[in-house]
Image (spheres, grey):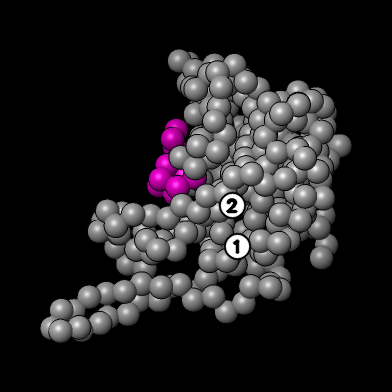
Amino acid sequence: MDIERLNQEGRALWNRKAQFWDKLHGDFGNQFHRRLIEPTVLQLLDLQAGEAVLDIGCGNGALARRLAGLGARVTAFDFSEELIRLAKARRRTNLPMVAYHTLDATDEAAMLTLGAGRFDAITCTMTLMDIPTIDPLFRAAARLLGKGGRFVFATQHPAFNSNNPIFVQEKEDRDGVVSDHYAVKIRAYLDLPPVKGSGAPGEPAPHYYYHRTLSELLEAAFAAGFMLDGLLEPAFTADDGAAAQGLNWQNLTQIPPVLSGRLRLA
């Protein structure tokens, strides 16, 4: 796998569709972010006012702004120059300023320029599946965290929501009652190459997704000196499904599309 070529192409794609994603997420994030990602990340993070937090792969800054609003001193970065420009433009005057940087999460040396041992916590939401290598990220994170620091991530669930799962709808007539049932079909799990997929309906261009099994994902963290001490698998609720239309994750209330975890230095 040509990591550098894939990474550069990924940056170009995200710059191209940054405006679309900024509008999709707005100030507070899209439905996925608000219902599944942010609540689980905040639960695992257990943020204390005044803590220094680094947000990796911040996009348009939805989580960074939320953390700042909760009293954190927030530094955030993304490898897309355009997303960082849009994140800065969304600064809210009633919140502490977020320090934004354009940095590449595959560049360990560049990440370390932020300051070894400087952060109480690191967040990384919906980024791990978008980058071709995660080993440099975890190695840098281990050095950027201070004593007792934690790393909280959220990513597409590798078992259910990786590299374009197939959605299935079935209609059942049981005892005269007709009902719809929804499922997701997975054809492979152990060995999947990078593929391009759309992250949201109507986006200008698909981007690369990098599938990693649970063992591969966690092994990269363990190799950098982390241990796992928290794990959540959020799914949409029946109320979400009642308002949903068509085949989408809101109808799959028994299958978690997101995996959130907390890592601490061993």
Q: Who's the residue at 81% across and 58% down the image?
A: 3
* Displayed quadrant of residue 132: bottom right
Please name the predominant secondary structure of the magenta segment in the image: helix
Residue 32 part of the magenta segment: yes
- Pinpoint residue 136: horizontal percent, then vertical percent: 81, 46
On-image quarter of the C terminus: top right
Q: What residue type is labelled 2?
A: Thr
Numbered disc 1: secondary structure: loop
In the displayed structure, 156 sits above or below 82; it is below
In the displayed structure, 14 sits above or below 252; it is above
For residue 17, say whether it is visible: no
For residue 211, say whether it is visible: yes
Q: Who's the residue at 32% across and 80% down the image?
A: 170
Numbered disc 2: secondary structure: strand
Q: How far apart are marks 1 and 2 (CA)?
A: 8 Å
Q: Is residue 12 left or right of residue 178?
A: right
Count residues near mark 2 (Cα–Cα under 10 Å), then give few for <14, some for 14-19, many for 20+.
many
Asked if the residues shown at circle 1 and circle 2 are in contact, with their CB atoms under 8 angstroms apart, the answer is yes
Q: Is residue 220 left or right of residue 229?
A: right
- Pinpoint residue 134: horizontal percent, then vertical percent: 75, 51
The magenta stretch spans which residues? 26-38
Q: Nearer the viewer, residue 130 or 256?
A: 256
Residue sitting at the far right: 109
Q: In this view, does 242 lie to the left or right of 85?
A: left
Q: Who's the residue at 49% across and 42% down the image?
A: 40
- Pinpoint residue 258: horizontal percent, then vertical percent: 52, 54
Residue 216 part of the magenta segment: no
Q: Name the residue under label 1.
A: 158
On-image quarter of the N terminus: bottom right
Q: Which of 2 and 204 is in front in this view?
A: 2
Q: Name the residue under label 2.
A: 155
Q: Who's the residue at 70% across and 56% down the image?
A: 217
